[in-house]
Image: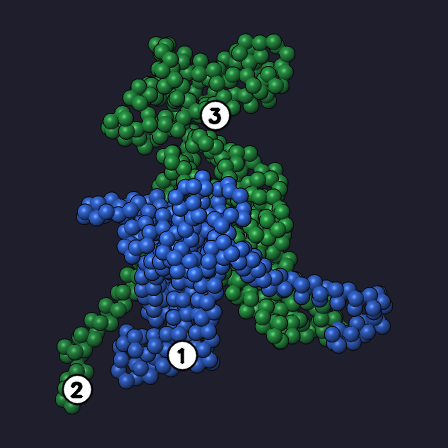
Chain colours: A blue, B green
């Protein structure tokens, strides 16, 4: 603030418009406002953590945390009558974790190779002209709202997969993990391709030239020199894409099932963490039942998983940047 | 040694193999890009192919006699009488006059099924607007039911056995007879763009959701743009490099990657349960979206401030401006177009966001057009979600048409961001 004070003094002597203290006070309060605005980001994080933790702790008072994390059965329906079988509801989240993992795995099997190969082509082979057309086209994929993907997956792709499954004699569920995972994979292609494109492009030219100099072809250079050099960045792109897939909600809400099956078969219906959060919290029910509180425990789990993935991804990138800068 | 020389000759099998590998690798890249773009193309084409029919609505031309005995037997033109009169029968009588042979109760009901239930609402609105038309006969185009609509649009397989389709053989015959007389036509579906939601597919419109989205985005912008810009100014221009600044920056980056549904949970726990704000209101939706867009806006605004060259600041400081004056009089106006571009892109993201709005209850069935930020409302993407869940077949086209409207807005927003950037980009 020292510079500000001297500047104020200088101007006041020539203009004398406003007393010095008034402007210092004014500027101090503006600065306070600016600081307060930048603290909103921290407050949001604190709000997220506190609200998730607070409700989750109440949930874990009713359902032991070990049952939630390791239980194999998920059926949160609280009973109409107290004497009904299974009236307490079962809150074992393993089938949800498995379903989330299965759908994310399918998505990454689609987005990983397609995204990476597109990025390699764009960064290494494509002319400037092609690059300037294809890259925005791929980025359109990232700009389309997820509810549109959900519609496409549930009402157009899923029936096609089921029909073609029945043609070759396979029994495909109408809300198969495959349909949701496939379309989710398409959605995250641009995340993989865009981030990988950046890291591949930032590999120093001298590495490639050295490789060409000893007689390697372009693809050999890419595979043996460029990709290993870009690997940390590519891994971090994959981690960010996975985190996006795990947290994605609308595609799975519309195209994946509600029934918690513990299966690795992509043709069957599975459910995910996000589907269950939506299922537990939409519709009219009173708050504060284990059923609604369970959604917050799931939200906390989701938050922790995606945060870990993001932090790991950022670590990878930082380490990589230090190598060449 | 001879092997090595041999292998470097252009026609050596080893080198040929390596060249083939090179071409294959290149092809993989092209195939990958083509697959991605093909998905985009197939998705857009199939959605547009489904959705464009919803912009047309089959209408039936009927001569409606506004019978004073039915509408207002007392002749007092009392508003409650006018609003509760049996307009349904006016439309149905007019329709029956074309088929005098229909007399049985069940047959009559089937015939009435060709006309939308919404027809009576339109007659009521006409009378309420101008009671003088009572007693006159007007030629009107009234909406057909979704069954007749699908038939006229050729989306019903008439070869199927009668029990497997919604519309009966008799109704098909009547519908085709009306069409042959020129009494059934497909007209521009203004109802889709001006109505709220409805249980009847032929009456359901997107306007309510559009207003809801607009109100939520308005709240979102009012909150996130000033806060985001101020945060960016602090971080870029004033913040000392210390722990706190570092923490804020890490925080912003992490917030940008938090799944959107978690923001919904935050809104549910804090805005609804703790602060007791109204459920389903665009106010709360806008607040949640504002928290989500904040990182995008801060990052864009910081980039815009960074793009303003230091010489501007030095010149301002040199003639005696305080740092605060430098920023607000010189740096901020130059950075503003870039910030607005970022804000528009952030708003476009917020417009497509669905999951957090589900959490705060903006997913209810709402017929009325919201009048303010406290009224219950839905939003465009949520409306699409609701329609996609509806079992009636006619909603399929509505859903796709809703997506077309949503994509239309996104294109407009992104294009204006691009244009704004082009118009105001300055090379220093």
Residues at discs 3 and 1 both on one chain = no
Counting from the top left corner in percent of width and height, residue A276 is at 43, 50
Q: Secondary structure at mark 1?
A: loop
Q: Is residue A253 visible?
A: no
Look at the image and tell me in which quarter the N terminus of chain B lies: bottom left
**What's the CA distance linking mark 1 and mark 2?**
31 Å
Q: Secondary structure at mark 2?
A: helix
Residue that sits furthest to the front in the current view: A83
Q: Residue at x 44, y 66 (%)?
A: A309
Counting from the top left corner in percent of width and height, residue A191 is at 41, 62
> Pointer 2: residues within 10 angstroms few (<14), some, or many (20+)?
few
Q: Which mark is residue B118?
A: 3
Which residue is the site of mark 2? B5
Q: Nearer the viewer, residue B168 or A274?
A: A274
> Pointer 3: residues within 10 angstroms few (<14), some, or many (20+)?
some
Q: Is residue A256 visible?
A: yes
Residues at discs 3 and 2 both on one chain = yes
Left or right of B34 on screen, residue A246 = right
Residue that sits furthest to the bottom in the current view: B1
**What's the CA distance linking mark 3 and mark 1?**
67 Å
Q: Residue at x 34, y 74 (%)?
A: A227
Q: Which mark is residue A290?
A: none
- Above or below, B181 relative to B392: above
Q: Secondary structure at mark 3?
A: helix
Return the chain for callout 1.
A
Which residue is the site of mark 1? A204
**Whether label 1 touches label 2, CB < 8 Å:** no
């Amino acid at each position: 603030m020292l510079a500000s004070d001297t500047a104020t003094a200088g101007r006041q002597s020539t203009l004398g418009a406003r007393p010095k203290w008034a402007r210092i006070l004014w500027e101090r309060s503006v600065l306070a406002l600016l600081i307060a605005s930048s603290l909103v980001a921290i407050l949001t994080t604190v709000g997220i953590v506190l609200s998730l933790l607070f409700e989750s702790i109440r949930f874990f008072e009713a359902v032991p945390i070990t049952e939630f994390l390791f239980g194999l059965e998920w059926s949160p329906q609280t009973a109409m009558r107290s004497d009904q079988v299974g009236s307490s509801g079962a809150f074992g989240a393993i089938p949800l974790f498995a379903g989330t993992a299965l759908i994310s795995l399918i998505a990454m099997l689609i987005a990983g190779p397609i995204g990476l190969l597109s990025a390699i082509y764009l960064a290494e082979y494509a002319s400037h002209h092609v690059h300037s057309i294809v890259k925005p086209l791929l980025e359109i994929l990232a700009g389309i709202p997820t509810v549109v993907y959900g519609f496409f997956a549930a009402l157009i792709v899923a029936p096609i997969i089921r029909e073609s499954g029945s043609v070759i004699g396979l029994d495909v569920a109408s809300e198969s993990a495959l349909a949701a995972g496939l379309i989710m994979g398409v959605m995250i292609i641009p995340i993989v391709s865009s981030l990988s494109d950046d890291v591949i492009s930032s590999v120093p030219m001298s590495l490639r030239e050295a490789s060409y100099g000893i007689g390697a072809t372009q693809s050999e250079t890419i595979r043996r020199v460029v990709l290993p050099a870009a690997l940390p960045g590519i891994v971090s792109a994959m981690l960010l894409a996975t985190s996006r897939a795990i947290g994605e909600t609308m595609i799975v809400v519309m195209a994946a099932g509600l029934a918690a099956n513990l299966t690795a078969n992509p043709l069957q219906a599975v459910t995910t963490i996000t589907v269950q959060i939506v299922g537990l919290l939409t519709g009219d029910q009173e708050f504060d039942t284990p059923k609604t509180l369970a959604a917050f425990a799931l939200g906390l789990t989701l938050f922790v998983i995606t945060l870990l993935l993001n932090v790991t991804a950022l670590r990878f990138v930082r380490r990589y940047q230090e190598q060449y800068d | 040694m001879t092997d090595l020389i041999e292998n470097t000759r252009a026609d050596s099998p080893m080198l040929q193999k390596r060249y083939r590998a090179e071409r294959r690798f290149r092809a993989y890249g092209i195939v990958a890009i083509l697959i991605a773009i093909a998905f985009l193309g197939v998705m857009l084409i199939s959605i547009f192919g489904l959705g464009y029919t919803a912009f047309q609505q089959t209408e039936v031309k009927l001569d409606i006699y506004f019978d004073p005995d039915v509408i207002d037997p007392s002749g007092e033109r009392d508003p409650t009488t006018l609003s509760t009169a049996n307009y349904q029968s006016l439309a149905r009588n007019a329709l029956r006059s074309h088929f005098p042979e229909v007399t049985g109760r069940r047959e009559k009901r089937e015939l009435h099924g060709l006309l939308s239930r919404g027809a009576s609402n339109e007659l009521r609105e006409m009378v309420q607007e101008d009671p003088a038309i009572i007693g006159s006969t007007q030629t009107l185009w009234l909406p057909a039911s979704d069954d007749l609509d699908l038939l006229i649009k050729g989306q019903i397989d008439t070869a199927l056995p009668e029990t497997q389709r919604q519309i009966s053989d008799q109704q098909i015959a009547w519908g085709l007879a009306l069409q042959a007389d020129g009494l059934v036509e497909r007209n521009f579906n203004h109802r889709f763009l001006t109505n709220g939601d409805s249980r009847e597919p032929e009456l359901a419109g997107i306007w309510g959701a559009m207003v809801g989205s607009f109100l939520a985005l308005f709240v979102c912008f009012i909150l996130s743009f000033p806060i985001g810009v101020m945060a960016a100014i602090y971080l870029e221009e004033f913040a000392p490099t210390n722990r706190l600044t570092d923490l804020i920056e890490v925080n912003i980056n992490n917030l940008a990657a938090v799944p959107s549904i978690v923001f919904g949970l935050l809104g549910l726990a804090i805005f609804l349960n703790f602060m007791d704000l109204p459920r389903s209101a665009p106010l709360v939706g806008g607040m949640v979206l504002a928290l989500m867009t904040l990182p995008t806006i801060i990052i864009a605004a910081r980039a815009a401030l960074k793009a303003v060259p230091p010489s501007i600041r030095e010149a301002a400081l040199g003639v005696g401006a305080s740092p605060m004056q430098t920023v607000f009089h010189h740096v901020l106006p130059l950075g503003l177009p870039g910030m607005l571009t970022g804000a528009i892109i952030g708003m476009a993201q917020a417009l497509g966001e669905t999951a957090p709005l589900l959490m705060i209850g903006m997913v209810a069935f709402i017929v009325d057009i919201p009048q303010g930020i406290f009224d219950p409302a839905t939003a465009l993407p949520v409306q699409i979600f609701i329609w996609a869940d509806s079992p009636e077949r006619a909603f399929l086209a509505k859903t796709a048409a809703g997506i077309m409207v949503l994509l239309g807005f996104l294109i407009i927003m992104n294009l204006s961001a691009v244009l704004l950037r082009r118009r105001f980009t300055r090379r220093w």
